[in-house]
Amino acid sequence: MKKLGLIVNPIAGMGGKVGLKGTDGLDVLEKARELGAVPEAPQKAVNVLKIIAASPKKIEIITCPAEMGENEAREAGFEPVVLDCVGKKSTTAEDTERAAREMLDEGIDLLLFAGGDGTARNIYNVVEDRLPVIGIPAGVKIHSAVFAINPRNAGELALMYLQGKLPNLREAEVMDIDEAAFREGRISAKLYGYLKVPFEKRFMQSLKVGRGVSEEIALAGAAEHILEGMQEKIYYIIGPGTSTRAIMERLNLKNTLLGVDVVLNKKLAANDVNEAQLLDLIKGKKAKIIVTVIGGQGYVFGRGNQQISAEVIKQVGKTNIIIIASKDKIISLTGRPLLADTGNEEVNNTLEGYIRVITGYKEELIYKIAT
C-alpha cells in the first residue's frame, strides 16, 4: 500500500482577493480576516484528494490534525492516519516543518502540500532531496516550480506517481520573495534550493522568469495601442505587473505595481483595490480587464492577481479581457498554452479556447488558453 503525506496550509492565499499580496505574519493574517478573507486552500486540497480517491488501489493518507489535513482527507472519503504533530489550530512555519519531519519518519512515498512559496520553503527545509513532493497551488505568490499548474493537475499527477506511471523525478526550484518589499512594489526573489517532483511537463508549472530590455519597446507600443482603443464610461481593471504598468505610465496615473487599479475615462477611479471593492465598483457597469502573462509560466489569472477573482471575471466576461505581452514572452512559452487557475472550474472552462494577445503597436496574435 502506498503512503501519501498531506500537509495543508489553511491560511495560504487568504491575502490575495483582499489585496494584501500574501499572508506572511500574524498581523497580516489578522488584517486579511478583518477584510473578510476566507480560507481557500482546504477546498483545493479536498478537490485534489477526490481525484486520488478514484484509485482502484488503496492509498493511505498520513496527515496533520484538523484543518491542516485531517478534515480535508475525511471530506474526500479517506480515513487518514493523523499524526500528533501540531495543535488543533496551528498553521505556523514551525508546524509545517515538524509535520514534514514526522511524515519522513513514517516512510511516506510522496508528500502533497497545499500552500504557496512560503510553504514550499518550509517543506524544503526538512525534506531537501529525500522525498518526492507535489505542491497544490494555493498561495498568492507562486514563483516556485514545485507546484502543479492547478489543483486538478496536482491530483492527476499524484495519482499517476502513486500508481507507478511516472517513475522519473526532476529537481524543481524553490523560490520565495520578501513580502514586506513586495507590498512596497519591490520584488526581491531568492532561490532557496531544489525539491524532487514527479516529472510530467503537462501538469507542472515552470519557474517564473523576468523580461529583457527589448520588451520595454514592445510594451510601450502595446500600451499605446490599448490607450487608443479605450472607450468612455467603461471601467478598465488594470492587473499587476510591469507590463500593465506601461499603460498607467502613459496615462500619468499612480500605479500599484503589485496590485490592481481601475481606470475610468482615462482617469484613476480606484487604486490598489481588492475583490470586494472591484465587485462593488463594476456592479451594473461595463468593464474590461487588462492583464499580462507571467513570464516562463504563462498564467494570466490565479497567480498574484487573485483580486480579479472568478466572480469578477464572470461579471466582465471573456470577450472583455485584454491581454498584453511581448512576443518574446509568448515565445518563451515554447508553444505551451496560457493558463488560468481562478479556483472556479466553471469560470476556468469559459476561459478555455483562443484569445487575442496585444504584443505591440497595432500588433496582436491569437493564442490558446488552457485550464
Image: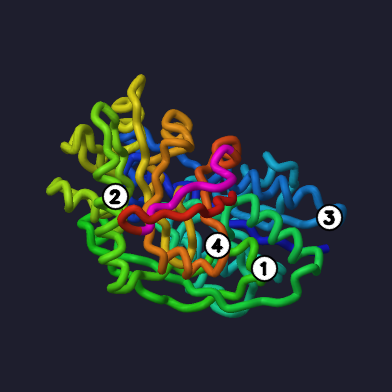
Q: Which of 216/11 is in front?
A: 216
Quick one: label 4 or label 2, which is nearer the N terminus? 4
Name the residue carrying label 2: 225
Name the residue carrying label 3: 58
Residue 156 picture quarter:
bottom right
Q: CA distance from mark 4 to mark 1?
A: 12 Å
Residue type, mark 4 in image: Phe
Assess disc 1: are there few (<14), some (14-19) or many (≥20) residues with their C-alpha within 10 Å of its C-alpha.
some
Q: CA distance from mark 2 to mark 3?
A: 56 Å
**Magenta portion: prevailing SS class:** strand
Residue type, mark 3 in image: Lys
Helix, strand or loop for disc 1? loop
What stretch of residues is rendered in magenta?
A: 350-359
Helix, strand or loop for disc 3? loop
Q: Which of 133/245 is in front?
A: 245
Check the image and report above or below for 242 versus 48.
Answer: below
Position of 296 with respect to 360 (left or right) is right
Which mark is drawn over residue 192? none
Residue 168 pos. (x, y %): 71, 77
Name the residue carrying label 4: 147
Check the image and report above or below for 228 versus 132.
Answer: above
Which mark is drawn over residue 200? 1
Position of 288 with respect to 300 (left or right) is left
Helix, strand or loop for disc 2? helix
Position of 249 with respect to 242 (left or right) is left
Q: Nearer the viewer, mark 2 or mark 3?
A: 2
Q: Residue lying farthest left?
A: 252
